[in-house]
Image: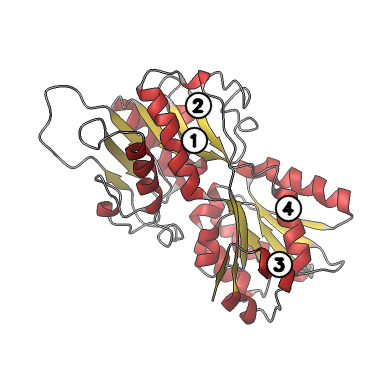
Amino acid sequence: MDRRAFLGTLGAGTLTVAHAGQAQPARKVPRIGILPFMAPGTSPATLIGPQPKNPYINALLVGLRELGYVYGEHFVTEVRSSARPEQWPGLAADLVRLQVEVVVAPGPTLAALKQATSTIPIVMVGSPDPVGEGLVQSLGQPGGNFTGLSLQSIETTGKRLELLKELVPGAAPVAVLWDQTVRRVWQAAEAAARDRGWRLLSLEIRDAAEIEGAFRAATDARASALFVAGGALAFSQSRRIVESALRSQLPTIYQFREYVEAGGLISYSADLIAVWRRGAFFVGKILKGTRAADLPIEQPTKFELVINMKTARALGLTIPPALLARADQVIE
């Protein structure tokens, strides 16, 4: 996904991108389906070809080149994308009808693929909680048609709360914005807060119309900060959430750096570029005949802390020097 295009607003139509026509070789060239979350208005030209401008898809293809796969000779891509979650099931079904050899997809669109097929291999890049979401039986033995990488979202929830408390200490409650797709992240946040004696305020949202009310509830409760737990709804309303957090003067931590690049305060997450690049390993194995069920789920090895200093100044916050020193990137 294009880093800046990732943070779009809901309301644009579907982006459906097929492999640009090339002279077909005599033999069948394997097709890799890709179902990323994408912002409305994204140009289809950024998603296709051997060197797409989209950094995530490009990272996948770089990984495949490193393994010796040549675009157009050993594989081509079929990309389907929309910013609207309700359209993901139809796009997943479209890839299934094309009978692609494998599909590569990030967390938000995986549920649609699970509904669409139990036979086509799916490479996750990555899933917040593959076991809890019912995508695999276990990390060591996936047991179905899903494999790839976990994002360790459950395991890192406590770390995000610790970073937020380091930034905004005190006894006031921390609000947590979540939806049903990340219920286990909310439960992990509850457990982490209980162990540390912190107070949380649950802000569950079921649709986009509830976002403004959630921020009013946080303000009324005098919450000191906000943790956006992610989820499909939050992804589709990213920019709106970032703007609401700033307007409400709520220091906020997010799961992914794209929020921070769009004006959010701080994020802590797996390096998604590295995750997509590693996804090529699983694709290569599957193209050579290995079953997804036999490829253990991997966990990310690189995490990144990103801080937006412009947003910190707008919120009147002083970032502790120790926290700044640990940041992988500071956006000025």
Q: Tally the numbered discs.
A: 4
Quarter-of-image position of residue 154 = top right
Quarter-of-image position of residue 23 = top left
Q: Residue at x 55, y 56 (%)?
A: 208
Tell me the amino acid under the disc marked 2.
Answer: Phe
Which residue is under mark 2? 146
Residue 118 location (% of width, % of height): 46, 21
Q: Residue at x 75, y 43 (%)?
A: 187
| 240 lies left or right of 188 | left
Which residue is under mark 1? 124
Give the distance between the C-alpha atoms of the residues marked 3 and 2, in whole angstroms: 37 Å
Between 94 and 205, the one nearer to me in the picture: 94
Q: Earlier in the sequence, mark 1 or mark 4?
A: 1
Report if residue 76 is visible in the image.
yes
Between 249 and 160, the one nearer to me in the picture: 160
Nearer mark to the viewer, of 3 and 2 = 3
Tell me the amino acid under the disc marked 1.
Answer: Met
Badges 1 and 2: C-beta atoms under 8 Å apart?
A: yes
Residue 318 location (% of width, % of height): 71, 78
Label 2 residue SS: strand
Q: Earlier in the sequence, mark 4 or mark 3?
A: 4
Give the distance between the C-alpha atoms of the residues marked 1 and 2, in whole angstroms: 7 Å
Tell me the amino acid under the disc marked 4.
Answer: Lys
Nearer mark to the viewer, of 4 and 3 = 3
Give the distance between the C-alpha atoms of the residues marked 4 and 3, in whole angstroms: 13 Å
- Color theme of the render: secondary structure
Label 3 residue SS: helix
Give the distance between the C-alpha atoms of the residues marked 1 and 3, in whole angstroms: 31 Å
Q: Residues within 10 Å of mark 3 (few under 14, many from 20)?
A: few
Residue at far right of view: 197
Question: Which numbered circle lies on residue 159?
Answer: 4
Q: Is residue 142 above or below residue 270?
A: above
